[in-house]
Every structure is written in structure tokens, then in C-alpha cells.
Amino acid sequence: VSVSAAERRLARRHSLLRFVATPRFFLALIILALVIVFGAAKPAFFNGPFVIAPLLTSISIFTIVGLAQMLVLSVGHMNIAVGQMAAFGAMVSGITFQLFDFPLVLGLVAGLLAGAAIGALTGWLIARTGVNSFIVTLAMSFALIGLVPTVYSWLSTGSAFTTKPDGFDFLGRDSFASVCVAGYCGPDAIPIIAVAAIATMLLIAYLYNRTRLGRELLVTGSNIKAAQLSGVATGSRIVIVHALSGLLAAFAGFLLAASIGSFTPAIGGEFMLQSFVGPILGGTLLAGGYVSITGTFLGITLALLIRKGLELFGFGLESLNVLLGVILLVALSTDRIRTIRRRRKPSPATIPEEVSA
Amino acid sequence: MKRQFATFLRSQNLTLAIIIVLGVVLLGVTSGGGFFSPVSVRTFFQFLAVPILIGLAQMITISVGQLNLAIGSIGGFAACLAGVLMADSGVPVAAGVLITLVVGAGAGFINGWLVVATRINGFIVTLATMTILSGAQYAIVSTRTISASNWMAIADLGRGTLLGIPLVFLLAVVVAVVVSLAFNHTVGGRRLLASGDNPHAAGLSGISNDRSVIVAHAASGLLCGVAAFISLASLSGVNTSVGGDWLLPSFAAPIIGGVALTGGTVAILGTALAATVVRLVDTARAEFQLAPAWVNFVVGAVVLGTVALGRAREVRDTRRAGAARARGAVK
């Protein structure tokens, strides 16, 4: 039976309507409006190398941080230690560069593995003991807050690793203006680092949309008992997802180090709040079972755009904190309304439970 | 079952007490007796008051199955607001004290109300209020430190002692006793525990879980206000750093002290003992001149260990109980 053109049109309109109702669409609208307002009020906002490129650099880094949090949110967990895992991974990379003269890629891999290892340890503790992920990651974050500066002060002078391998500055500080093909160079407003963020987003999107593991993570998050009954080894999925979260956190820490030019213990200090703001604004459910990768990107973009705007108009950073807190509360109230609406649908979803039960 | 549980609590407190005694002896020996000098003892208790209070503040929210990330920023904001008003606006000292308590309880009430009204996860609500309040704290004091000379009456109180024990520590003890009485001997306290243990059962027996959540958050905020007052009394001045390092100790004390994270239990003595252990770690850190970061590392590791051990014990107990039941059934 062929579907008539009218029906197809109706279906398309329906899916369009559904998209308009998502937080992503709403976020995109606000972002567009803010860009227009900032640009109109301060033409300097459109300055490629000095405003747009740094903004895109931080958006790239924090999108990866947001994805690191989104991963654990997808199984209904949280990672309070996301910033400290970033600091830990970056520290290991820094050590390999400073003390062992590793090339760029090897040092990066070492840092990523360190992040994944600390994440896997966290996930193992959660899965093994069944204790709330909040407490385990909180304790882990403080253990690392203690460990990282101590290691820096042991192994470096001035608490920073400053050795830069070849390509480090290119990755962190250059824009496409330095990538020239046949005499044509790219725009100076787009930093090289954006490639890393886009690649990460595509990989995570692939994980959730196309792989069995991704679907199993979502099932685990939406109803862990149903997941176990359908043969998903939820314990190992929890370990894997925390390891991946640690890996992405370490990647973000590495990129931040590349963009500021050295490895310091302060890396990751600002990650925790932003890591929640991005996914939550973007529509990822705290209870688990639903993720939005573009939403996370848009949520991060909005938060950093507001920050840039406040800077441009000369407000202090403390007003950013106040604003972010308020935005978080408002956005979550709407998240709440969305969940209630979802439950009212014909086949009501069961309330996802925390693993600690 | 109940007796078993009581024994477990006692043994936890006993373990903590033994650790404290060992720690004190060790510190006393390594410092060549210097740790027992009157000044050293006074300092030890002076800076034990705040850890006990914030541990209890967190314990109250945990008892109803909530948590409070905003503890440090409520305390910091309350202390700074009172400090600024006393220093710049000439607010009398007595009113300053009142301000810390009212701001604390008010902020806690708002937390609880937001959790109840919006049904948002308490974690996110308190994360948001934490951010907002720490932003506000920075906004009112920015980079300056407001000297304690603006509230000499409070500072004198902070220096006061009774039989060599600082008054602020005695204040913390009084608060702990009041909290203990409230949980053990008042209907309101029992209601909080009922809501935390099993909200569904509590609701069916006519207890308003919403009210329990609001009361718990407000009480938690009030204790943060008391901690803010003690900070005003014992620090040489207040700035944006007040409250910044309260988060981990506030969780460490109840968790190490034997409070179940799932709600429904309290351990006032355990919380106070655990806060003392953390304070000992801090003192030892200063004694051996290690970096302050070490305290975080040790406390974080101890919390992880306690949590893992407690869970292992729980699993073992349920297995044993199951095995006993099975044997009984066979007979």
C-alpha cells in the first residue's frame, strides 16, 4: 500500500511540530537572538580572531565536558568528579611530555587512558558497592583534588608542566587561517580545536544511535530492572560508561591545556557546573534513558554565549554564576513539566530508579 | 534486628572513638606534648565547631533522603551579608547575629520549597542555589576581607572559654543535643525519619512528605546560619573563601558517622565523632607541614572506604539473615 502524498506531508508536518517543541529548537532560537543582540549592540562581537575564535574554542572544550556528563546521565548516574578527572588525565599527559618527551599523540593517548582508568575505577566502585553515584564521584573528586596538586608540586617547578610537543600549539591555539591548501587559507574565526569537538560529537552520536552498547546504556538508564531481565550486563555497562566519561573528561582537560599552553592543577576547576548545565538545558533527562547530543552542544553554547555577553558588557563573573543558577532552575522546571507530560501518554513509562536501591 | 542495628551503631561509634584516642595519642607523642598545651587544645576545639555543625546540617537533609550542596554557600553568604551590614551599614551586632540565622534558615526554606514545588531533583536545586549564593557572596564582598574588628562583641564571644573549652564549641555541642532531642523525642523529628525511611508508608500514615522536606532543608539552613555565626566569631575576618571548603566535610561526617544515604536514620554522636576525626587529620596535616590538599585526599579516600565497607557489611548481613531463614524453614 503506497502512502499518499497528503499523508506523507502530514507526517512531515508532525515531525516538524515535534522538533519545534524540543528544547533544542528553543535553545537555537535563543542563541540566534542573543547573537543578533550582541552583534547589534557591540559590533566588536563579530571580530573573528579575538572574540569568535576564543568563544568557539571554549564551546568546543566545554561541549566535550558536557558530553562526558551526558554519558553518565544516560544511565541515570552523575559524575561530580568530571573536572578532577580532566585534571588527572591532563596531569598524566603533562608528565609524559615533561619527563619522558612523548610525542603529541602518545601523550594524548596516555592521558585519555588515565582518565578512562580513573573513570572505570569509579564505575566499578559504584557497580560493585551499589552506592549512589553522587557520593562515590564526590569522594573521588576530593581524593583527586588532594592528589593532583601534590603530584604537580612534586614533579614540576612552579606547579605546571610547560613542555610542548610538536603540534601542541597548533591543536590548541591555531585557527583554520593557518591551514592553507593551494594558496587558499581557512577562516581565522574557526579554531582547529573545533574539529576535536565535532569528531567527539559524531562518535558519541554513533554510539547512541547505531551501536548495541549505546542502546543498552539507554535501557539501563531508563529501567535497570528491565535491562537486567532482558539480558543486559548492567554492571559492566556502568563501568564502561564511567570509563568513557573519564576519557572524555581527560580529553577536555588536554584540550584546555593545549589552549592555555601549559598543564596546571587548575584545569577542570570550572567544569562541574557547566557539565550539568549543557546536557540539562539540552533536554537530557537526569533520571537517565534519554540523551541529546546536539542539545548538549546547544546548551553549552548558550551558557558560554551568555558568559561572553556579560564580559562584553562589562559585568563581573559573579553575575554569570547567579544567572546560570537561575537558568538551571527555570530549565529544570520545564524539564519536569516535560517528564510529567511524557508520563501522561498512553503507555506510561515507569519511573527509572537509581541503582542504589 | 533492632538490637543488631543498635549494636552496629555502637560499634561504629566505638571504632571512631578508638581512632580519635589513637590519633590524639599519636599527635601528642609526635608533637612532644605540644598538642596538649592549653592554646593548642583551645584551637582544636575552636575549629571543631563548624565541622560538627555542617555535618549535622547535611545529616538532617540526608535523613529525609535529600542532600544539600549549598551548605557552604549558605553559610558563606550569611556570614558575608551580616559582616557587610555590620561593617558598612552600622547594623548593630545583635541584629548581625540574627541576620546570619534568618538568612540561613530562609535559604534552606527556599531550597526545600523549590524541591517540593517544582519536583526537581534536590541535587540540581541545591546545585543551582549554591551557584547563585556563591555568586551573591562574591557580589557583596568582592575581593576584600571584612575585618572582625567591626563586630568586636561577637569576636570576644569567639575568644571566650569555659574551663579551657571555647564557648563556640560548647554552642555546637548544645546544637547537637537539641538536634538529638528533636529526632528522638519530638513528633516532628520522628516524622522526618519516617519520610526518609519510606515516603510511601509515611504518606499513607498521614505524614506530609512535602512538609518533611521543607522542614529538613530549613533546619539544615538554620544550622548553616549557626556555622556562619561561629565563623564570624572565630575568624579574623570574612571574605569570599568562607564556606568554600565545607562541602566535603559536610558529607564526610555523616557518612563516616554511620548515617544511611538512603535516608531514615540519623547518627548525631557518630557525625560529631567523625567530624572530630576529620579535624584530627587536619591538625596532623598542619603538624607534619603537608600540603592542605592532603586532607582532601585522605578524607575522600576514607569516605570511599567507609561507603564500600558499609555496603559489604550490609550485603553480608542480608546473606546471613537469608541463610538463617533458610535453615529455619528446613527445620
Image (tube, rainbow, N blue to C red):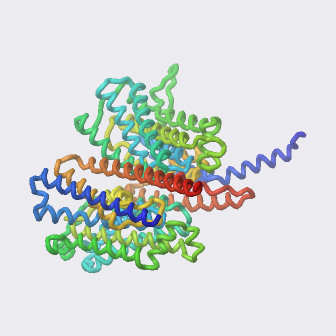
Q: Nearer the viewer, residue B301 or A31?
A: B301
Q: Position of residue A46 (x, y in %)?
A: 48, 44
**Callout count:** 0
**Quadrant location, the N terminus of chain A:** top right
Q: Is residue B177 visible?
A: yes
Looking at this rendering, what residue extends furthest in the right direction?
A1
Q: Position of residue B74 (x, y in %)?
A: 37, 66
Corner quadrant of residue A263: top left
Question: On the rendered structure, is A5 left or right of B59?
Answer: right
Name the residue at 43% across, 29% down: A109
Question: On the rendered structure, is B32 left or right of B78?
Answer: left
Q: Nearer the viewer, residue B185 or A79?
A: B185
Q: Position of residue B227 (x, y in %)?
A: 30, 68
Corner quadrant of residue A166: top left
Looking at the picture, does residue A341 appear above or below residue A262? below
Corner quadrant of residue B49: bottom left
Looking at this rendering, what residue extends furthest in the top direction?
A182
Name the residue at 43% across, 32% down: A113
Q: Nearer the viewer, residue B198 or A43?
A: B198
**Quadrant location, the C terminus of chain A:** bottom right
Looking at the picture, does residue B292 appear above or below residue B82? above
Name the residue at 17% across, 48% down: B288
Q: Is residue A259 visible?
A: no
Question: On the rendered structure, is A292 left or right of B84?
Answer: right
Q: Position of residue B130 (x, y in %)?
A: 41, 61
